[in-house]
Amino acid sequence: MFDRRHLPYWAVFFVFSATLVILILMGRNLYCPCGEVKLWYSGDDSGQGSQHLLDWYAPSHLIHGFLFYGLTFLVMRRISMGWRLLVATLIEGAWEVAENTEAVINRYREFTVSGEYYGDAVINSTADLLAMFLGFWLALRLPIWASVAIVVGFEVLTTFLIRDGLALNIIMLIWPSESVLAWQSAG
C-alpha cells in the first residue's frame, strides 16, 4: 500500500535522478576524461577539478545543506521535513544544472580564479547533491552552534587552503572584484 507520507521522499529521489539525467543530456562527462575516477582531487588548475568524485568545492555543497535547512526551517516551519528536503533538492539540483551551462562556465572562467573550469562531471554533481543531503541531515541533528561552527570552519579552511569558498564564489559570480581575483591568484 502506498503511504502518502513517503511521497516527498519519492519526489526527492525523482528530482535527484532527473538532475543527473539532465546533466547527461547536456553532454556532461560521466567522469574525468583522463580515464580515472579519484575519490578526492585536490590538484592543480589542469582542468580536472570537478571531474572526480570530491574536490575542494564539496564543502560548499555541504554548507548548502545547512543553509537550505535553516531557510526552510524559517520559511516552512510547519511543513513536513520531507517537503522541506524536496525544496532543498530542487534548489541544489537547479544549481547543478545552471552551474553546468555554458553561460555560467564562461562566467567562472572569466571572473573567478577557476580559469580552467570546464563544468562538473556527472559523478562530481552526484557527490555535490549527496553533500547537500549530508549538510541538511547534519543541520537537522546538530545544535545550531555546531552547525554554525561547521559552516564557518569550512569557509575558513577553504579560504585558507585554496583562497576560495562559498562566500567568495558567490561574490565573484555576482559582483566580481579585481582585488579579490588578484588575491586569489597570488596563492
Image (cartoon, helix red, strand yellow):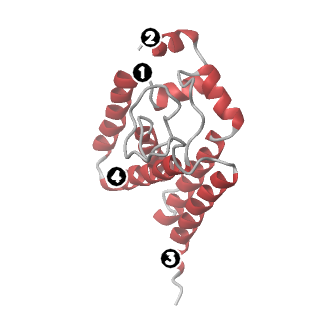
The mark tally for this picture is 4
* x and y, in percent, of residue 13 in the image: 54, 66
**CB under 8 Å between discs 1 and 2:** yes
Q: Nearer the viewer, residue 15 or 175?
A: 15
Kindly identify the amino acid type of the residue bearing the numbered disc 1: Arg
- Rounded to the nearest angstrom, the CA distance separating label 4 from label 2 is 35 Å
Which label belongs to residue 186? Answer: 2
Q: Amino acid at mark 2?
A: Ala
* Identity of the residue drawn at 45% across and 25% down: 164
In the rendering, at what x and y percent does residue 166 appear? 47, 32
Q: Position of residue 31 (x, y in %)?
A: 52, 48
- Residue assigned mark 4: 138
Label 4 – label 3 distance at C-alpha: 22 Å
Q: Which residue is mark 1?
A: 163
What element does badge 3 sit on? helix
Q: Is residue 173 above or below residue 2?
A: above
Q: What is the three-letter code of the residue carrying label 3?
A: Arg
Q: Residues within 10 Å of mark 4 (few under 14, many from 20)?
A: some
Look at 50% across and 35% down and name the residue there.
48
